[in-house]
Image (tube, rainbow, N blue to C red):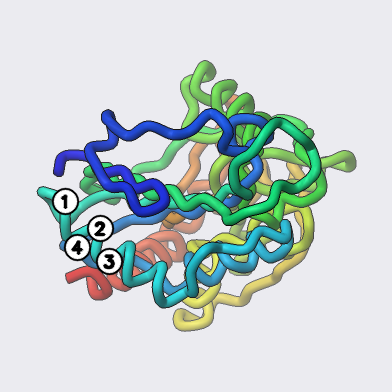
Amino acid sequence: MKELGYYNGRIGELSEMMIPMADRVCWFGDGVYEAHLCRNYHIFTLDEHVERLFKSASMLEIKIPMEKQQLKDLLNDLVKRMDTGDMVVYYQVTRGSGKRNHAFPEGDANLWVTLTPKTFVPSPDPVSLITAEDTRFLHCNIKTLNLIPAVMANERAKRAGCYECVLYRPGYRVTECSHSNVHIIKNGIFYTAPTDLLILPGIARAHLIQACNALGIPVSETPFTVDDLKNADEIITSSSTNPCVRACRVDGQAAGMKRQDLFMALYEWIMNEYYEATK
């Protein structure tokens, strides 16, 4: 198949799949999701993403309609139906279906999966960022489908000709980006925001910390400010579909780009891990 869709056991071309309007995703965005890369029919970091999906669902009291291993088996089976082994694997669980009512409905949750071809072509080339106030709710640690503030922030970045929008809370504490985590290197130390209610505990973020530990780069999981960001030696964003990206500008001003040795060491470690796991 060119693009594949799955919904509660039904499988077909993505453009032909139909979703009931009574699914609570339509009323409330009531669900959780994961997305990551697949190469050569090998889904990268599958165990970690499925674990986070179940954790997010548990925090919202959504019962996923299968066990973890069953979901992994399903995803591995679905990728084999594709014409290419290189793709983005996306899946979400919504609270179920029913009449529009804020109270939880009876019945099972709904499982969606989409598979779309994508060849990941990594690049160490730097990107530009902008900053904006973080107006999201206080459960950013849950990978919920309620993404309107992130959508608006990413559109601001797009219109400014930038790769990402870095978000900050009152006091100018940096949290994360519209669809990435963000980190800095200063004086040889890798700084990343703590995994509290204000950021998503990113899978790629965790792998960058592992890379730092392997390379002997000190790690500090402490808050940092917009000023710290703009005066950092290096600025790095990470996501499951682009795990190590270097920034060279913030809000139109030159920034970072002072420790290429450390950035390239992290970049090469992450890329090697990805290629080894998906060969």
Q: Residue at x 61, y 76 (%)?
A: 218
x, y (%) of residue 144? 64, 48
Tell me if mark 2 has few (under 14), some (14-19) or many (20+) residues whose alpha carbon lies within 10 angstroms of its own.
some
Q: Dividing the image into 4 quarters, which one contains the N terminus?
A: top left
Whether pointer 4 and pointer 3 mark residues with C-beta atoms closer than 8 Å, the reply is no
Q: Residue furthest right?
A: 171
Q: Residue at x 37, y 70 (%)?
A: 72
Residue 184 visible in the snapshot = yes
Mark pair 4, 2: CA separation: 10 Å
In the rendered image of this protein, does residue 210 appear above or below residue 137?
below
Which residue lies under the disc numbered 1?
Answer: 82
Residue 71 left/right relative to 173: left
Mark pair 4, 1: CA separation: 9 Å
Tell me if mark 1 has few (under 14), some (14-19) or many (20+) residues whose alpha carbon lies within 10 angstroms of its own.
some
Which residue lies under the disc numbered 2?
Answer: 78
Which residue lies under the disc numbered 3?
Answer: 76
Amino acid on which disc 4 is placed: Tyr
x, y (%) of residue 109? 57, 54
Q: Earlier in the sequence, mark 4 or mark 2?
A: 4
In the rendered image of this protein, does residue 277 appear above or below residue 201?
below
In the rendered image of this protein, does residue 84 appear above or below residue 76?
above
